[in-house]
Structures are given as C-alpha cells and as structure tokens.
Image (cartoon, rainbow, N blue to C red):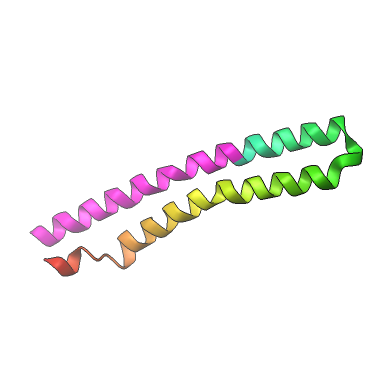
Amino acid sequence: MERAIVLAASAIGAGIAMIAGFGPGIGQGYAAGKGAEAVGRQPEAQSTITTTMLLGIACAESTGIYSLVVAMILIFMNPLVNML
C-alpha cells in the first residue's frame, strides 16, 4: 500500500517538475523576439547580438533541463521506493 502511494506521489511530482518547462519556453521566445528586433534595428551588429542571444537562451534552457532530469529520476530511478 505504501509503495503505491510513493509511486503515485512520484508521478505527481514528476508532472509538477515538468511545469517548470513553461518558464524557459517563455524566456527563450522573449529573447529570440528581442534579438530579431535588435538585428532589425542594427543589422551591422548581427553577430554580436546573435552570440549574446544564444548565450542567454542557453542559460534559460538550463532550468528546463534540470526539471526534466528531476522528472526522469522520479519516474525511472525512484530512490524513495527502496526506502520502504
């Protein structure tokens, strides 16, 4: 009985962890939009703008990757089940 509760709670926790994917998605879209806007205003600075934009997008994506790793651990390598 306790095992089923732990597995159910782990599945719910994995789902909640994946909600963290909305933040990086919104942030990356905003950064890409502002990068395109900046290139439109100053086409000669395209390489600098693109480099800075990609660095910012990579930093924003790390949050989504961490949440994916937490969800995968909760689903496939659940450490809480072994504690029962």
User: In which image quadrant can residue 31 be found?
Assistant: top right
Q: Residue furthest right?
A: 44
Q: Is residue 56 left or right of residue 5?
A: right
Locate residue 63, reporting x and y percent.
Answer: 49, 49
- Compared to residue 43, the image places residue 72 above or below, namely below
The quarter of the picture where the N terminus appears is bottom left
Q: Is residue 53 magenta?
A: no
- Compared to residue 23, the image places residue 58 above or below, namely below
User: In which image quadrant can residue 56 be found?
Assistant: top right
Residue at (37%, 56%) from the top-left corner? 71
Residue at (34%, 45%) from the top-left corner? 16
State which region is magenta: 1-27
Q: Is residue 13 left or right of residue 54?
A: left
Residue at (33%, 66%) from the top-left corner? 76
The quarter of the picture where the C terminus appears is bottom left
Locate residue 75, reporting x and y percent.
Answer: 32, 61
Q: Is residue 10 left or right of residue 59?
A: left
Locate residue 10, reporting x and y percent.
Answer: 25, 55
